[in-house]
Image (tube, rainbow, N blue to C red):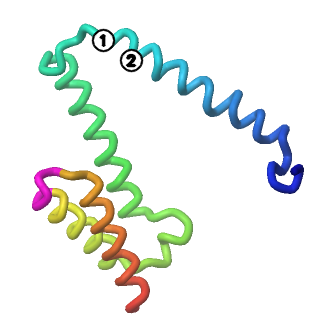
Amino acid sequence: MSDFIGDWHALLLLVLAGFLPNEIWRMLGLWFSGGIDEGSELLVWVRAVATAILAGVIAQILVFPPGALAAVPGALRYGAVAAGFVAFVASRKSILIGVICGEIVMLVGEWWL
């Protein structure tokens, strides 16, 4: 059984330092947001800031790719993002469809090249 679990100290540390602190904030957010109107100006602003942060992270990964992604040609990276965005818009804003399409373009492009 120890071969399957591995080092249980590392798993315990991962749960205590990584999982529990995040879950506490998520549960508090869920509890406090029960009576907030989704169309309020505050939540529209929060959604806009979250979207801007996500766009910034994606742009940073595209321009300065980390790890193995650095070996992928820039044109393929940008093409995969463009294809994912087109699929996202065409599928009536389904994030899952956009991500899957971008990944397929990336995998097929890397296989072909």
Amino acid carrying label 1: it is: Gly
State the image coordinates of residue 91 (x, y, percent, origin top left). Answer: 14, 58
Q: Which residues are magenta?
A: 89-93
Amino acid carrying label 2: it is: Leu
Residue that badge 1 annotates? 34
Q: Is residue 14 above or below residue 21?
A: below
Looking at the image, residue 71 sits to the left or right of residue 94; the answer is right
Q: CA distance from mark 2 to mark 1?
A: 6 Å
Queried whether the magenta region covers residue 70, the answer comes back as no
Q: Is residue 99 above or below residue 29?
A: below
- In the image shown, does 108 or 44 lie closer to the viewer? 108
Looking at the image, residue 46 sits to the left or right of residue 15; the answer is left
Name the quadrant of the C terminus. bottom left
- The residue positioned 23% from the left and 11% from the top of the image is 36
Picture quadrant where residue 82 is located: bottom left
Q: Which mark is residue 30?
A: 2
State the image coordinates of residue 15 (x, y, percent, origin top left). Answer: 69, 33
Say whether marks 2 and 1 touch (CB < 8 Å). yes
Q: Main secondary structure of the magenta part?
A: loop
Picture quadrant where residue 63 is located: bottom left
Secondary element at image label 1? helix
Q: Is residue 25 above or below residue 11?
A: above
- The residue positioned 33% from the left and 40% from the top of the image is 53
